[in-house]
Every structure is written in C-alpha cells, then in structure tokens.
Image (spheres, grey):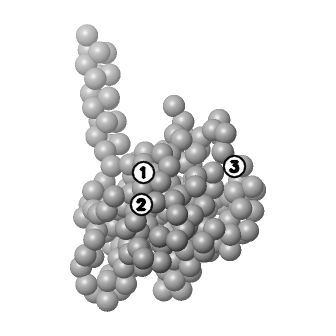
Amino acid sequence: MTAAVALGATFLINSQALAAPAVGQPAPDFIGVDTAGKQHRLSDFAGKFVVLEWTNPGCPFVRKHYGSGNMPATQKAATAKGVVWLAINSTERAASDYLKPPALDAWMKDQSAAPTAVLMDEDGVIGRTYGARTTPHIFIVDPKGTLVYAGGIDSIPSSRAEDIKTATNYVNQALGEAFDGKAISAAATRPYGCSIKYKT
C-alpha cells in the first residue's frame, strides 16, 4: 500500500513538472545537444533574449518559411540584435522524415538558415517540457529567464508562401517591442503547422 501511495505521489510530481509554462512564467531550463555534438544549456544565455523554434524539414509549413527565405531572414534579424536563436528538432528517430544531425545541418545550410544552434531532441524531452505542438512553434525567453512569447511565427496559418507578405510576423513584432521597452502586444498566439512526431 505504501509503495502504491509513493508511486502515485511520484506520478503527480512528474505530471506537475511536465506542465507547459505559460507566458509570464519562468522558462524551464534544459540542456540540448546540437548537430555538432556540443551541449547548450538555456541558463547559459541568461541576460539575453532567446528564441526557441521547433522545426522539422519534412513539414510543408516549415518548408514554406525556409524555402521562401522568411525563417532565415527572421533568424538573421534577431541574431543581429544579439538574440540567441535555438532551432529544436523533436522528431523521433523512427519517423519517416527524421533527419540525422549531419543531414539536418546540411539542410539548414542549404536554406541559408542562421540559428545560433540546431538542437536534437529525438526523445522529445525539451519539446514536451515546453508543450511544443507544431512545427514551427516559437517561444521567446527574455534576459531574466521569463517566457514572454509563445505561438506561431505569423498571423496567417497556411502553407502558402505567398501569404507571408501580408502576414504579421509575430517574432519580429515581439522582439521589436521588447527591445523598445514596450509590452509585447501579442504575447500568446496560436501555433500552426505539422504536429510534432514525438517518441511514444
């Protein structure tokens, strides 16, 4: 009986620990390994804005934003301001569109992408911690470690590249407002894209 109670308590603690953070709450720390095998810890970037971008090159919504040049341009605009940009792939190894680190790295280079690092999260630990649901799904952490944005890259949830020019780029908008010392006007938006193929 005691063992059962202990197991129940452990389950509750784990469930609470896995609750996705909301905007305004501390961003959970994590350690991720990039495509070159280097470790990155979120807390190492304290004092800087950090963008977390969930990605999967097999997703047409991801290809829309990379193939059009929109995601690379957004990355470059952010990193030029000193923002750290971490692209994260939580696609499990068994998925048909999973890319091994060298292949993912090569794809990013082919797209002229400019993230600070591309992290491999095949076990889905980072993705589940943040409640990442789609590719792309964007989160922004401020220099104090608070989650200040969560949602889509822009305001038109389609896979059509031609919609980019009339959409509001929520990432550019949020970072621009934050750097100007303003409150982020759209801090939580609806992410859209392909569902993340988490390890089951």
Quadrant including the N terminus: top left
* Position of residue 24 measured from the top left corner of the image (x, y, whole percent): 25, 64
Q: Residue 50 versus residue 29: which sits nearer the camera?
A: 50
Question: Which kind of residue does numbered mark 3 sit on?
Answer: Leu
User: For mark 2, does the 10 Å Cα neighbourhood hold few (<14), some (14 to 19), or many (20 or more) residues?
Assistant: some
Secondary structure type for disc 2: loop
Q: CA distance from mark 2 to mark 3?
A: 25 Å
Question: Which kind of residue does numbered mark 2 sit on?
Answer: Pro
Residue 57 in which image quadrant: bottom right
Secondary structure type for disc 3: loop
Q: CA distance from mark 1 to mark 3?
A: 19 Å
Which residue is drawn at the image coordinates 25% and 75% (left, top)? 185
Above/below status of 98 relative to 102:
above
- The residue tagged 2 is 157
* Position of residue 120 measured from the top left corner of the image (x, y, whole percent): 61, 52
Which residue is drawn at the image coordinates 54% and 68% (left, top)? 161
- The residue tagged 3 is 99
Which residue is drawn at the image coordinates 29% and 15% (left, top)? 4
User: For mark 1, does the 10 Å Cα neighbourhood hold few (<14), some (14 to 19), or many (20 or more) residues?
Assistant: many
Which residue is drawn at the image coordinates 35% and 42% (left, top)? 18
Question: Which kind of residue does numbered mark 1 sit on?
Answer: Ala
| Dot 1 or dot 2, earlier in sequence | 1
What number is the disc on residue 160? none
Q: Residue 181 versus residue 68: which sits nearer the camera?
A: 68
Query: Do the residues bearing badges 1 and 2 touch, measured as CB atoms within 8 Å?
Result: no
- The residue tagged 1 is 132
Report the label total: 3
Residue 152 visible, this orientation? yes
Residue 15 in which image quadrant: top left
Query: Marks 1 and 2: which is nearer the front?
Result: 2
